[in-house]
Image (spheres, grey):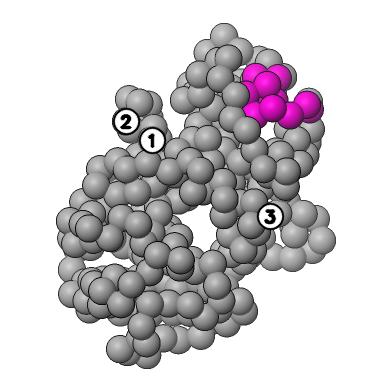
Amino acid sequence: MVRGLDLFAERFAGFEDCYVLIGGAAAYLVQMEADLEPRATQDVDIVLCVESLTPEFGERMWAFIAEGGYEMRQVGDQPRNFYRFAKPGDDRFPKMLEFFAREPGRMPLAEPGHLTPVPIDEAVVSLSAILLDDDYYALIHAHKRQDSGVPMITEHALIPLKARAWLDLSQRKDQGERVDSRDIKKHRGDVFRLYRLLVPGETTVLPETVQRDMRAFLEQQRGQLDANYPKNLDIADEAGDEILDQLAAMFGVRA
């Protein structure tokens, strides 16, 4: 279990329409539910559904931050649609909470304490930009369900999000920006780990932008997956290009 997620679910019961869990924590939960070994994660990434936010949710959120005694309270300087809370004084709470608001500057209620504006790393910049895209925001809402008491996106949205994050970070690194190569590898690995959850023959219809990005991701993986790569991710009896063909068919793209 992701540290503190059970407590988060308990404290935010009744506010399931106001947020959705994405990223590594969501990937962890969907794989655990299927009895697959997930990649460990400590971050809890949350998208705020600004169209459903209420003052009551804001009060509950800030009460949770205060109760956890979060020492680090940050807001991204550009764009201001990212908020990070870390170093809780209480070990029952998530080690790090990262909130993404679709509308820059939109957090529920005024913050009761000081938020420090900070430059944010390229991985966060990438995800912030993705969530501002209408097609990706629609994808998140089209593929969410509740598990372990929290609303979260399924593998049908996680895979395209991870693919887009890989594309963005790879391009930024190629352009000379400071990007941690481990983040790039992590997103690619997550795509193929989550592939294990898909049902052959089922197709997920993607919005136009998402479909284009998924196609680009698959095209760039051709010839890049050696024979050991699938085996290292516990994918047996499938070669790399066979997996890419399956992903292309399942998401309705050609690559």
- Asked if disc 1 and disc 2 are in contact, CB closer than 8 Å, the reply is yes
Q: Secondary structure at mark 3?
A: helix
Depth check, mark 3 against mark 2: the one in front is 2
- Left or right side of 19 for 215: right
Distance of mark 1 from mark 3, alpha carbons?
A: 24 Å
Q: Residue under label 2, please give it.
A: 33
- The crowd level at tag 2 (other Cα within 10 Å; few <14, some 14-19, many 20+) is few
Distance of mark 1 from mark 2, alpha carbons?
A: 5 Å
Q: Is residue 141 magenta?
A: no
Residue 39 visible in this rendered orientation of the protein: no
Q: Which mark is residue 169?
A: 3
In the displayed image of the protein, which residue is found farthest to the right? 175
Give me the residue at 56% from left, 76% from top: 104
- Left or right side of 40 for 180: right
User: Where in the figure is residue 61, as x and y percent of width and height?
Assistant: 28, 72
Q: Secondary structure at mark 1?
A: helix
**Figure quadrant of the N terminus:** top left
- Using the rendered view, name the quadrant where residue 148 is placed: top left
User: Where in the figure is residue 36, as x and y percent of width and height?
Assistant: 37, 26
Q: What is the magenta range?
A: 244-255
Vertical side of 74 occupied by 20: above or below:
above
In the displayed image of the protein, which residue is found farthest to the top? 237
Name the kind of residue labelled 1 in the image.
Val
Vertical side of 208 occupied by 197: above or below:
above
Give me the residue at 29% from left, 49% from top: 150
**Lower position in the chain sequence, tag 3 or tag 2:** 2
Name the kind of residue labelled 2 in the image.
Glu
Q: Residue under label 1, please give it.
A: 30
* Residue placed most toward the observer, 57 or 233: 57
